[in-house]
Amino acid sequence: MTPACVVLDAMGVIFAAADDVEELLIPFVASVNGAADARQIRSAYLEASLGAISADEFWARVGLSPAVEDDYLTTHTLVHDVMPFLQTAKAAGVPVWCLSNDVARWSAKLRAKFGLDRLLSGAVISSDVRSRKPDAAIYRRLLEACGEAPADIVFVDDRQKNVQAARALGIASIEFDAETGFRDLAARIFGTDRGGS
């Protein structure tokens, strides 16, 4: 049966970098002569993604101006076939939400940059709600935001611990497989292969 709502993780599901801090952020900061200590960058990012410091404060913590932010965001790319999947969901009348551990300003800029806002019904971002997956609180905020019962949602994430946390709350969850990607996911959720080209 087609779910009432689909929820996608951002990094590793919508966006290609599964660990954006290690794969993109730390190398970027180093490339523009910011902090060289990876632990310092990780710590500042964790605080920013929990809403404890702002995006501007994050850049200051790593020795950079916020002016570099848009250059950093250009390092992100979409997972292959995510756009056809989102279009399939829209055509089927199934709302798709994003649930992400991220800095809200960065997430909003990325959604706008790639034209995701026209295909997503909404997004719950950790820095806005001050909770990160796999904490139960962020899933509860998602349920409040989308207005659906846990059993009526399908949640997709590439990290097993996040999938397990959602399942513990009664949310049907799928661990994303980058190898089979969205074609397999569309078949599982919509009974079609229209999610892929």
Image: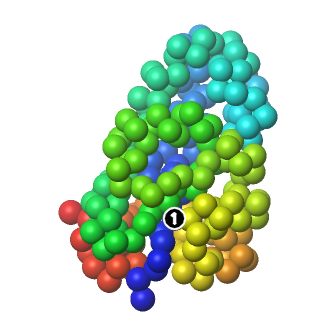
The residue at 34%/61% (across/down) is 86
**Image location (x, y in percent) of residue 91:** 27, 69
Determine which quarter of the picture holds residue 168: bottom right
The residue at 73%/37% (across/down) is 51
Q: How is the image coloured?
A: rainbow
Relative horizontal placement of residue 117, taking residue 165 as reference (left or right):
left
The residue at 50%/54% (across/down) is 122
**Image location (x, y in percent) of residue 177:** 46, 66
- For numbered disc 1, what is the local secondary structure? strand
Q: Residues within 10 Å of mark 1 (few under 14, many from 20)?
A: many
The residue at 36%/55% (across/down) is 119
- Quadrant where the C terminus sits is bottom left
**Farthest residue, direction bottom:** 1
Identify the residue position indicated by label 1 in the image: 7
Vertical relation: 74 (above or below) 185: above
Q: Amino acid at mark 1?
A: Val
Q: Is residue 161 visible?
A: no
